Amino acid sequence: YFFISDVSTSVAESLYIWAISVIEIPIMLLTLFALCVLIKSNRIASVYVINLIFSDLLQIICILLFTTKFDSDELIGVYYYLLIAGLYFMACVAFERYLLVSHPHWYKSHHSLKRSCFVSLMVWFVPLIFADIKPPYLYFTDLPQTVACFIPYPIIILCFVGTYRGLSHSISLTSLNRKLILGSLFLVLLTYTCLILPFVIMDFFNYFTSIERMNMVYEKADRFLECLLYLNPLADCLLYLFMRADVVDIMKSVPCCCKTDRRQNSTRLATSSNREVLTNTDLDRFMKK
């Protein structure tokens, strides 16, 4: 198991869990409701985000139960089942953004709400591949679950690089839309790199070196990485902003985006004025002839 099953939850960590849960649960419920509304407007891209937020919500419930007498090995198995499923939904979001930019015609012709729901259903079964099933309980051993958590990371990186290259050759998209598409992928990559990857690396390190579990430095690092992992659901909720149709108006209210728009407008005005000057000059030459 990961560290949660080996180190008892301290009072400070329990207070931290309840504090972030009070913030995360209302935000996730509002985000789920808003994303379901977007589904009605045929925004299929939000299907994977809905499943991601839903898995995050269930993770928070499990984390809250860790601080109570209901904590058990079976509950830890459920938590890591949800965590692994959420990571693969993050990979689905990244891969979908990649297809939208690099293969837009294929994406429009093959993508549908039913297919997105079918893929989402398949993703929910992926963690079972790495699980040790002993009905009615579910367990995860060290190495398989660590590998399961790491596999989505290279997929997300490849999708980010492929999307970045595809956007450089895309003419139909405006600069702001490019930023939004790349921003959603960057958020997924940043969330995994900063909040999840350190936890996975620590588990790899622990598995191959057999560090003493009661080592003070190890225990402090363990608790710190757990606290980072608990922030993952809150970071995932930010993906909702990139699903909104009016996100362009939100981005324009940001000072840096305003400066970019002003520069683009000034460049367009300068280009149009230069064209007018050239046109007038050619007209004068023609009249003189």
Image (cartoon, rainbow, N blue to C red):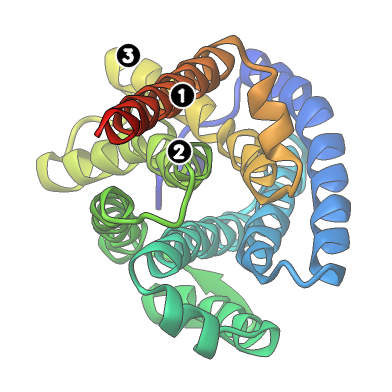
Q: Report, in whole angstroms, how far the alpha carbon at label 3 lies from the one at label 2.
A: 50 Å
Q: Which residue is mark 2?
A: 175
Q: Nearer the viewer, residue 43 or 222?
A: 43
- Amino acid marked by disc 1: Gln
Quick check: marks 2 and 1 in contact, CB under 8 Å?
A: yes
Q: Nearer the viewer, residue 176 or 83?
A: 176
Relative to 230, does residue 117 appear above or below in the rendering?
Answer: below
Q: Report, in whole angstroms, how far the alpha carbon at label 2 lies from the one at label 1.
A: 9 Å
- Residue at screen point 40% across, 46% down: 2
Assign a secondary structure to mark 2.
helix
Q: Nearer the viewer, residue 115 or 62?
A: 115
Quadrant containing the C terminus in the rendered view? top left
Q: Which residue is mark 3?
A: 216
| Side of 97 relative to 208 (left or right) | right
Relative to 16, does residue 250 appear above or below in the rendering?
Answer: below
**Of label 2 and label 1, which has the lower sequence position?**
2
Q: Which residue is mark 1?
A: 264
* Position of residue 141 measured from the top left corner of the image (x, y, whole percent): 35, 63
Quick check: marks 3 and 2 in contact, CB under 8 Å?
A: no
**Of label 3 and label 1, which has the lower sequence position?**
3
**Of label 3 and label 2, which has the lower sequence position?**
2
Task: Count neighbours of disc 2 (C-alpha within 10 A) and say few if under 14, some if 14 to 19, many if 20 or more.
Answer: some
Seen as rendered, the residue at the extreme front is: 289
Where is residue 277, by image quadrant?
top left
Tell me if I can see residue 40 in this picture.
Answer: yes
* Position of residue 65 measured from the top left corner of the image (x, y, whole percent): 75, 43
- Amino acid marked by disc 3: Met
- Residue at screen point 21% across, 40% down: 206
- Residue at screen point 43% across, 58% down: 94
- Amino acid marked by disc 2: Ser
Task: For marks 3 and 1, give the one nearer the viewer.
Answer: 1
